[in-house]
Amino acid sequence: RRWAHNIPSFSHLNAVTEEDLAHFHKILAPTSILSTLPPNSTSTDDLASYNEDWMGKYHGQANTVLRPRTTQQVSEIVKWCAKRRIGIVPQGGNTGLVGGGISLQKEIVLSLGAMSNVRSFDPVSGILVADAGCVLESLSEYIAPHNHIMPLDLGAKGSCQIGGNISTNAGGLRLLRYGSLHGTVLGLEVVLPDGTILDQLSTLRKDNTGYDLKQLFIGGEGTLGIVTGVSILTPPAPQASNNVFLALPNFNNVLPLYQTVKRQLGEIMSAFEYIDRTAYDMGISHGLGPILDAGEVGDSQCFVLVETSGGNQTHDEEKLNGLLESLLSAEQPLINTGVLSQSPSQFASIWAFREGLTECCQKEGKPYKYDVSVPLADFQKVVDAIRERMISKGLYGDHAISKVMGYGHVGDGNLHMNVIAKHGYRPELEEALEPYIYEIVASHKGSVSAEHGIGSMKTHALHYSKSDVSIEWMRKIKQVFDPLNIMNPGKVLP
Ligand code: FAD
């Protein structure tokens, strides 16, 4: 199986033995241990949900999964693994899209799912302190009665965990408004690769006392330590939210539209999402729509979802209505048609269309997912170049790559390119796609990973976005934190 590049042999690591398992039984309750080794008798099938990723692309080989309930238990497990040189793969909700949470050899999976308590919430400051295993959506529900929202939101919210979000530095649908986790995370509690508990669970907005170590774990993908607790600043819930869905004749209008929308909506604009025609048609065919009248959509080439979050419903609606009117009445309209949500359910269904696209890709076949940052003006060029490449290789069509499409967070310069292999992943398809895609992205001075991370999928492509000097210093940092290389080995660094 060739699903990760250069799967390392890990000769420095040991597989879990019955003796190790006996030790884990001293730390954890029996129900917190899943293992195929005696005296446990978990079947390989019972481990499947930990050994296979959301896309069914990455297949792990872990024979033991540990589900600690406390930071102290995590610390004791890690101490033992360091002593015995056992590799550890931290795992949250297992919704990551780059194979970061899946074992490469016989590392144990340390699942954070049983650490799911809110530790405190201050409704005045909006500061939430929670266990890393809390599911993002459940945190949203917890703070909703206090009129606060989580500063991030993504399609996987029902399964992904806040510790996983932090470890992947997840971006998502609210980044445009509330910024990245590097700004909203105030503190972390982390179990380091020798088992030491690093308690930096600060609730201070301002703290300039030397190096800000927590930043290394935000986007660290579990390679430097296990995040066990999180302190995060949550913004007040907007008093009014609206969205519009717009159909554009062609891609050339996206940039002028973005500028117009920013100018007219100003501070209330909270999302600006892009969907190309292929992705739109796929969404419709899987029952996500209709959002717009098919006749009015005509041959529109792309679509944009704009969300506003403000303080006054009437004021925001006036602004949005004014925007739509000015767009439609312009001499050379930037849009063909558009719809302004008229009710909470229509608001939700417009968002459901955008958020549902990732799942639709799964239903279409096996998606190669490329989550890249490129200058806004180059979005469509990159997608077209990939499609043309597959056509020129004779690999475009139902026999191979059936669809190439782009959607994403235009406001953040983040394009999600999905290349659908109708009948499954095949080495020759991947060889036609990579490193070509990374070369194209690099030629546009983009990033090979905008928000999903490197995991095991892109270790070989890291150099397209990071200089040799940067990679050398990343290695030095890894060496300082994890000299035994037990913490998520084989991930991030080539
Ligand atoms: P996992 O998948 O379990 O793990 C991801 C990585 O983090 C692994 O390397 C793992 O080892 C590490 N990790 C997990 N928990 C910890 C921990 N406590 N301590 C240390 N390391 C840990 N991402 C975006 O950025 N924006 C999006 O809009 C977006 N939309 C998505 C939509 C869908 C439908 C899906 C399936 C995924 C989407 N993603 C998106 C991918 C995103 O990275 C994940 O959904 C999420 O952030 C990962 O959280 P998780 O708990 O599932 O982590």
Image (cartoon, helix red, strand yellow):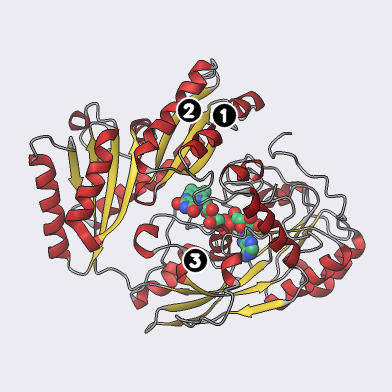
- What's the CA distance linking mark 2 and mark 3? 32 Å
Sequence-first tag of 1 and 3: 3
Q: Quadrant of the N terminus?
A: top right
Amino acid on which disc 3 is placed: His
- Tell whether 234 sits left or right of 29: left
Q: Nearer the viewer, residue 378 or 12?
A: 378
Where is 51 relative to 388, above or below? below
SS for dot 3: helix
- Whole-number angstrom distance, CA of label 2 to CA of label 1: 7 Å
Sequence order check, earlier mark of 2 and 1: 2
To which residue does mark 3 refer? 182
The span from disc 1 to disc 3 (Cα, nearest Å) is 32 Å
Which residue does the image show at 14% across and 57% down from the upper left?
319
Disc 3 under 8 Å from ligand 1? The reply is: no
Q: Amino acid at mark 2?
A: Ile
Farthest residue to the front: give it.
469
Q: Verify CB contact (< 8 Å) between mark 2 and mark 1.
A: yes
